[in-house]
Image (cartoon, helix red, strand yellow):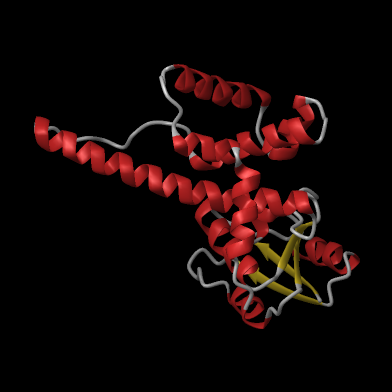
Amino acid sequence: MKIGYARVSTGDQNISSQIHLLEQAGCERIFQDQATGVNDKRPGLQEMLGMLRKDDIVIVYKIDRIFRSFKEMIKLVEFFNNNGVFFSSISQSHFDTSSANGRFILNMFAIFAEFERDLISDRTKEGLANARRRNQTLGRPKGIKPAKKIKYETALHFYKNKNIPIDTACENAGISKTTFYRVDAFYRVLESEKKTADPALKNQVNLLDQIEEIGKKKKIL
């Protein structure tokens, strides 16, 4: 069953255009929310999540209509995966988990989120230990933000596996070419500074193997 979800912010009058596009996409039922600036519960979304069944397809006009943050994206994608629900964006065709490429992208988000949590945890523990020894207070470690890292890896995947120009790959992944090259340079410098390979970085290169393993362990409710 195709199920649509539409959301607008206060003062945004585009809900009707979203609903029209969702109807054209074949949605049999459409849930909607309008932000008030105070109420953050999104009853329409909650109702939709409660009625989803295995093999349903959640369709949105753009992913920012349902995902308001990276953290929320990971949480909802995990929910969809665990319940055998597919997800698709009308205006961003590469976000379609009914296709192999779409599954790759969204599962990659989950992999990087887990990697980032582990990395931050390890760095925090190491930093606190060093701070205790030096009696210093450490700030937040600098690096590439998770969302930017994901967009870079997505563009790299498009470029290497879909045989398209880097400009097109970056556009599809939602990252500027300048930012892509900056992140790429960051990783090249990081790699050159290491005498031995970091197992965590190897896991980034072998994303497809990790995704296949996640698929084997995934529980369908």
Relative to 107, does residue 153 appear above or below in the rendering? above
Q: Residue furthest bottom?
A: 51
Q: Residue at x 74, y 36 (%)?
A: 158
Q: Quadrant of residue 137?
A: top left
Report which quarter residue 60 is drawn in: bottom right
Residue at (59% x, 71% y) in the render? 219
Q: Quadrant of residue 80?
A: bottom right
Q: Work out whether 115 lies above or below 195.
A: below
Residue 59 point in image, percent of width and height: 76, 64
Examine the rendering and report whether any part of residue 66 can be seen: yes
195 vs 56, left or right, is left
In this view, the residue in front, 39 or 140, is 140
Q: Is residue 140 left or right of residue 38?
A: left
Q: Position of residue 4 (x, y in %)?
A: 76, 69
Task: Name the side, left or right, on which 199 lies relative to 211.
Answer: left
Q: What is the x, y in percent for residue 47?
A: 63, 80
Work out which quarter of the rendered image holds the N terminus and state it. Answer: bottom right
Total residue callouts: 0
Out of 71 and 114, give the one closest to the viewer: 114
User: For this rendering, which residue is in front, 94 or 107?
Assistant: 107
Question: Percent x, y for residue 221?
Answer: 62, 78
Please state if 195 lies on the left or on the right of 133 as rendered. right
Does residue 148 show up? no
Observer-nearest residue: 27 or 105? Answer: 105
Q: Residue at x 22, y 35 (%)?
A: 138
Q: Residue at x 54, y 53 (%)?
A: 69
Q: Is residue 133 above or below residue 14?
A: above
